[in-house]
């Protein structure tokens, strides 16, 4: 899909004048945007700009102070917890410990919204788990304890759990922060591929601008709690926009192979 056509796809999630405050501090100023099926959207911006607050609101980890979020046309608040978990899979910046749990057991937790605590784990659930393990190249590690894995392998295990959850929207808050460059590229390429194959909407918070430009169809730039720019990577990753976003003089070069913009501090 041409990145310029991202805005023409069907909207899955819509935010209208959404804000978030902590006490008297306005952390997120009014945000209105749509996240579309089959599109991977990256969120970039300096630390403390409101990126994590935005994704937590969409994942219903916290409530907006004002405004409305709709999923498939319905207010987000109308969804019961298990019903919402069938639609949105969320990977926080810091994942909880998985003490005594194997990789397969962790991934199987992704099926909980579909069968419940007392429900029967059936053949379809097992097939979804095995497929998620294969897609993340974890089949050979399925019986290993999660806490015995490397940082990159653990991140892939949590992503596999999200895949087994079989949702229409993936929300990932800095999923590559603990990964080396090879595993960063691997994870982002997989998320990008999934948005295409399954018509998912993916929202990913990233610090690496070049990785964001390489794998995302569109970018949202946030500074001081406000969306200051949104568009295709070629539109956002340019000296003036990045300079205003990060407060540094930035330069841009085209990638010699793909032509995608590569940023650097000039």
Image (spheres, helix red, strand yellow):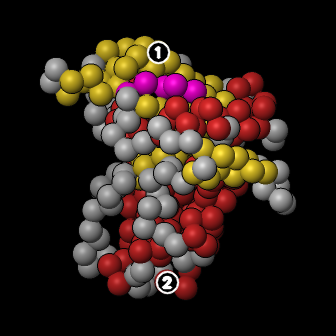
Q: Nearer the viewer, mark 1 or mark 2?
A: 1
Residue drawn 52% across and 25% down?
Answer: 228
Q: Which label's residue is closer to the chain start, 1 or 2?
A: 1
x and y percentages locating residue 248 in the rendered image: 51, 42
Quarter of image, res 4: top right
Give the answer, above or below, for where 137 lies relative to 210.
below
Tell me where residue 243 appears, x and y as whole percent.
55, 37
Majority secondary structure in the magenta region = strand
Magenta stretch? 225-229
In front of the other: 192 or 118: 192
- Tell me the tag on residue 16: 1
Number of marks in picture: 2
Residue 87 visible: no
Instruction: Tell me if 184 is positioned left or right of 10 in this view.
Output: left
Q: Is residue 226 magenta?
A: yes
Q: Any magenta on residue 69?
A: no
Residue drawn at (47%, 37%), measured in percent from left and top? 247
**Helix, strand or loop status at disc 2:** helix
Q: Mark 2: give few (<14), some (14-19) or many (20+) Cα within 10 Å.
A: some
Residue 250 location (% of width, % of height): 60, 44
Whether residue 219 is situated above or below residue 66 in the rendered picture: below
Is residue 97 rendered to the left or right of residue 126?
left
* Residue 160 vs residue 243, the one in the foreground: 243
Disc number for residue 141:
2
- Which residue: 70% across, 33% down? 235
Lateral position of residue 237 relative to residue 168, left or right: right
Q: Quadrant of the image for the N terminus?
A: top right
Residue found 41% across the figure and 85% down from its top: 144
Tell me the SS state at disc 1.
strand
The image quarter containing residue 150 is: bottom left
């Amino acid at each position: 899909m041409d990145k310029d056509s991202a805005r023409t796809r069907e909207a899955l999630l819509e935010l209208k004048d959404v804000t978030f405050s902590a006490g008297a501090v306005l952390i997120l100023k009014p945000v209105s945007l749509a996240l579309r099926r089959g599109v991977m959207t990256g969120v970039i911006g300096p630390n403390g700009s409101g990126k994590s607050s935005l994704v937590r609101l969409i994942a219903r980890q916290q409530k907006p102070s004002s405004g409305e979020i709709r999923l498939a046309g319905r207010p987000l608040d109308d969804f019961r917890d298990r019903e919402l978990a069938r639609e949105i899979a969320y990977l926080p910046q810091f994942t909880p410990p998985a003490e005594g749990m194997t990789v397969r057991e962790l991934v199987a937790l992704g099926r909980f919204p579909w069968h419940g605590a007392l429900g029967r784990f059936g053949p379809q659930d097992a097939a979804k788990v095995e497929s998620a393990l294969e897609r993340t190249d974890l089949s050979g590690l399925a019986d290993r304890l999660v806490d015995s894995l490397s940082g990159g392998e653990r991140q892939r295990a949590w992503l596999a759990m999200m895949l087994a959850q079989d949702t229409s929207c993936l929300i990932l808050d800095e999923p590559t922060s603990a990964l080396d460059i090879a595993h960063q590229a691997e994870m982002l390429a997989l998320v990008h591929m999934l948005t295409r194959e399954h018509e998912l909407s993916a929202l990913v918070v990233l610090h690496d601008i070049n990785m964001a430009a390489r794998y995302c169809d569109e970018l949202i730039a946030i500074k001081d709690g406000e969306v200051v720019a949104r568009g295709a990577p070629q539109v956002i990753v340019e000296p003036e926009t990045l300079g205003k976003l990060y407060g540094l003089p930035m330069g841009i070069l085209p990638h010699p192979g793909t032509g995608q913009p590569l940023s650097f501090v000039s």
